[in-house]
Image (cartoon, rainbow, N blue to C red):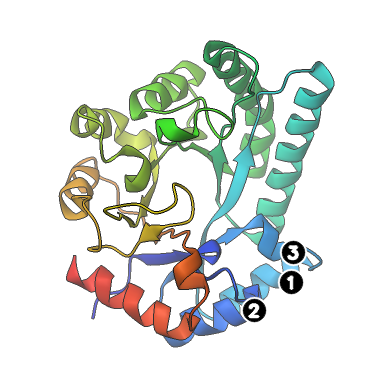
């Protein structure tokens, strides 16, 4: 069983504490973990990072920063401050990367939100560089363009990363958000060394909830193996990160769920 490139997000097993998640992932020979910031609340972040590494897990990234677009200058400054805090948290945790869910502000044009995203990432990039933390821009499905992200295609993410022109700024490819895009293959190839992260799950048919009904790999209609092939052709040798939001799976036995994740991954 080759699980050497398998990473699981803590949000995938949301009912578990970070301590229990680390122990379970380690016991099941999962190689990597991406930590969501909510899992760190009330904890000594540096000690938590040490605990995770003691379990034999590689910390792949911290999720999430972003949400730059806001209707007022004060709110935009608050967003920048929160991203600077995320950089500090990633450094303390020992995470080499932050995933950016870029945000959108209802009540203003998407192009305005996109410009605020560019300005926000440019503002925090020097701090990320100084801390040695990469910033991965994650485009989200257009159904989230109202509040979650004005960056909705990989082409937009690539344009933004190239415009910022920093080795510390790249993109995250999540199959759930991008599988539908007819230009996906060429845009993945365009990423090159700017491809920082690869997230996997599946799109159920029918989808019962646009946020909280993601499926295990193989449960839906996403051609995950084909997309992963395109990702590998870029030279990407990072982790396959399982990121599943599912009220159905969260309500069940998380150890059993992890077994299902492993099997679905191996079936790819």
Viewport quadrant of the C terminus: bottom left
Q: CA distance from mark 3 to mark 2?
A: 12 Å
**Residue at 26% in and 41% down:** 179
Label 3–label 2 contact, CB within 8 A: no
Where is residue 156, by image quadrant? top left
Question: Which residue is under mark 2?
Answer: 19
Q: Identify the residue at image location x=25%, y=31%.
A: 181
Q: Which mark is residue 166?
A: none
User: Alpha-carbon neighbours of circle 3 within 10 Å: few (<14), some, or many (≥20)?
Assistant: some
- Image side of residue 166 versus residue 31, left or right: right
Residue wearing tag 3 = 45
Badge 1: residue crowd in 10 Å (few <14, some 14–19, many ≥20)? few
SS category of the residue bearing label 1: helix
Work out whether mark 3 precedes mark 2 in sequence or the reverse, and give the earlier one.
Answer: 2
* Residue 29 seen by the camera: no
Horizontal and vertical percent for residue 144? 49, 34
Q: Nearer the viewer, residue 150 or 54?
A: 150
Circle 2 residues within 10 Å: few <14, some 14–19, many ≥20: few
Q: How many marks?
A: 3
Mark 1 vs mark 2, CA separation in Å: 11 Å
Q: Are marks 1 and 3 in contact (CB under 8 Å)?
A: yes
Tell us which disc is closer to us: 3 or 2: 2
Badge number at residue 47: 1
Residue 120 in the image, given as x and y percentages of width and height: 65, 24
Residue 141 at x, y percent in the picture: 40, 35
* Residue 241 relative to residue 109: left or right: left
Residue 185 visible in the picture: yes
């Amino acid at each position: 069983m080759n699980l050497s490139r398998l990473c699981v997000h803590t949000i995938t097993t949301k009912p578990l504490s970070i301590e229990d998640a680390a122990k379970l992932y380690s016991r099941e020979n999962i190689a990597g973990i991406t930590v969501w910031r909510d899992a760190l609340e009330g904890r000594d972040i540096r000690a938590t990072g040490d605990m995770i590494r003691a379990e034999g897990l590689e910390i792949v990234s911290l999720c999430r920063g972003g949400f730059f677009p806001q209707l007022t200058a004060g709110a935009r400054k608050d967003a920048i401050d929160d991203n600077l805090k995320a950089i500090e948290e990633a450094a303390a945790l020992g995470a080499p990367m932050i995933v950016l869910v870029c945000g959108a502000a209802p009540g203003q044009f998407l192009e305005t939100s996109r410009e605020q995203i560019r300005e926000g990432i440019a503002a925090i990039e020097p701090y990320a560089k100084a801390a040695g933390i990469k910033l991965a821009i994650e485009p989200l499905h257009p159904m989230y363009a109202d509040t979650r992200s004005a960056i909705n295609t990989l082409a937009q993410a690539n344009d933004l990363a190239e415009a910022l022109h920093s080795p510390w700024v790249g993109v995250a490819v999540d199959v759930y958000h991008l599988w539908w895009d007819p230009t996906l293959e060429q845009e993945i190839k365009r990423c090159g060394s700017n491809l920082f992260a690869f997230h996997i799950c599946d799109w159920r048919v029918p989808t019962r909830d646009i946020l909280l009904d993601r499926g295990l790999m193989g449960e839906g209609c996403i051609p995950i193996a084909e997309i992963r092939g395109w990702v590998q052709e870029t030279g990407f040798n990072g982790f396959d990160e399982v990121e599943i939001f599912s009220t159905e799976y969260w309500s069940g036995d998380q150890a059993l769920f992890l077994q299902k994740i492993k099997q679905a991954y191996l079936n790819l």
